[in-house]
Amino acid sequence: MIFVVTAAVILGLTYVGVALTRFPRVNIDRPSAAFTGAVLMLLFGVLTFRDAVAAIDFDTMALLLGMMILVAVLNQAGFFTYLAIKAMSLSKTPLGLLVMVVVSTGVLSAFLVNDVVVLLFTPVVIRACRMLRANPVPYLIAEAMASNVGSTATIVGNPQNMLIGIASGISFTRFFVCLLPIVVVSTVALLLLVLLFYRKEFNHRFQPDDMGPLRESSRVDYKALRRLMPIVGLTMLAFFLSSYVGVSIPLVALAAGALVILFSSVRPSEVIRNVDWVLLLFFAGLFVVIGGARQAGVLDFFLNRITPTPDVKGIVSIHVVSALASQLVSNVPFTILAIPAIQSMPSDILWLSLAAGSTLGGNITIIGAVANIIMAEGARREGVEVHFGEFLKVGLVVTAVTIALSIATLVVELNLGLVR
């Protein structure tokens, strides 16, 4: 009994620490909260060191590591800056710029981890808006939300989808085919709603040559990109074929990471330094904390009261709970906590509901998803303030509409027998 109480207290404190890192003047952050919780599980004997290592999902860690290396090398070659500037230079009107920001961010986020895409796109969007004398806030809000929406489509789009993809065993292709319709209709809804909220910002025309200075200031290693793009293409193809050729998705990601290091002109040590080791520590810590809580029996109380069923009720409940819980502890910690409950039900529809609900639900507030926080902090460094209330005003409506569209789409797929 003492281990149950101890594990429950550590679990609670860890998740409070993860939540409180959202507020100013609190001397803790998400990785340190997870790391401290994991250490406490060991110190108080809830887990042995061997048990703690076994609790870490190394498939997910490998997938994250491989994608981080791939993205780091592409960033060094100027890939993201090139695409962002190329897309925005094609925009002649505010509406065209909005479409380019939403579509390019969404597509890239589906395949190259949305947090990184937002990090690299935000300063480019702001500089483009300044040159075009446009208010950057609508485009930044649309960028963050499009990143979350687009990342819903694939297992490699965001960290929570990686967790769900590995835990569920759903193939990359099946995951993509089932969730792509949700992404498409949600992207259209996002565009229409941003236009509705900021209709006064879209009634003028840009000058054709305004993007010139931004294009000239970009640093792109075209020689490196010519070597790297075939690897990126083969990696995407391998993801889709992985279930048919018997190769795991994490292994594909690691192989891609190894190849881009070998064929890039960047020193390997520099690539390794650019890997987000802090995020990997955060994941490892959460895995250990959840593993300790599960072994001590703390999650039994939780799991016995959450019995999702593969029907309309289960789809709706997972979407709603995921969206609301993401505002408290963000979608990644919630997903790690929710996975044991879904594992008890052999149904793909529940996994897909968790992926869509936890990701789309992150659009309610700035603190609902890491991508939103990255956008807001990046904008602040550039002298642009995206206020919590303004994001919330748009986010509530966007999330309500996209969650409803997601539920409706999955219910149709379930009734048509496209997913069980």
Image (cartoon, helix red, strand yellow):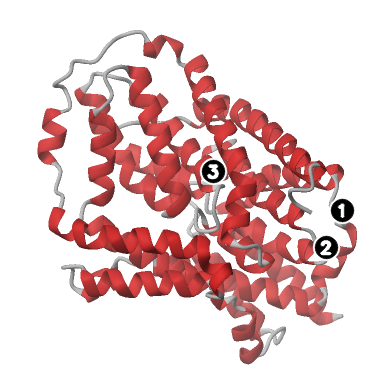
Q: Residue at x 17, y 60 (%)?
A: 224
Q: Residue at x 79, y 81 (%)?
A: 3
Answer left or right for 229 relative to 195.
Answer: left
**Disc number placed over residue 309 in the picture, else none:** 1
Residue 45 in the image: above or below residue 244: below
Instruction: Specify which label sits upstream in the sequence, 1 or 3.
Output: 1
Instruction: Specify which label sits upstream in the sequence, 3 or 2.
Output: 2
State how many labels appear: 3
Name the residue tied to disc 3: 367
Spatial separation of the CA atoms under disc 2 and disc 1: 7 Å
Q: Residue at x 71, y 32 (%)?
A: 404
Circles 2 and 1 in contact, beta carbons < 8 Å: yes
**What amino acid type is highlighted by mark number 1?**
Thr
Q: Is residue 281 visible?
A: no
Secondary structure beneath dot 1 equals: loop
Spatial separation of the CA atoms under disc 1 and disc 3: 30 Å
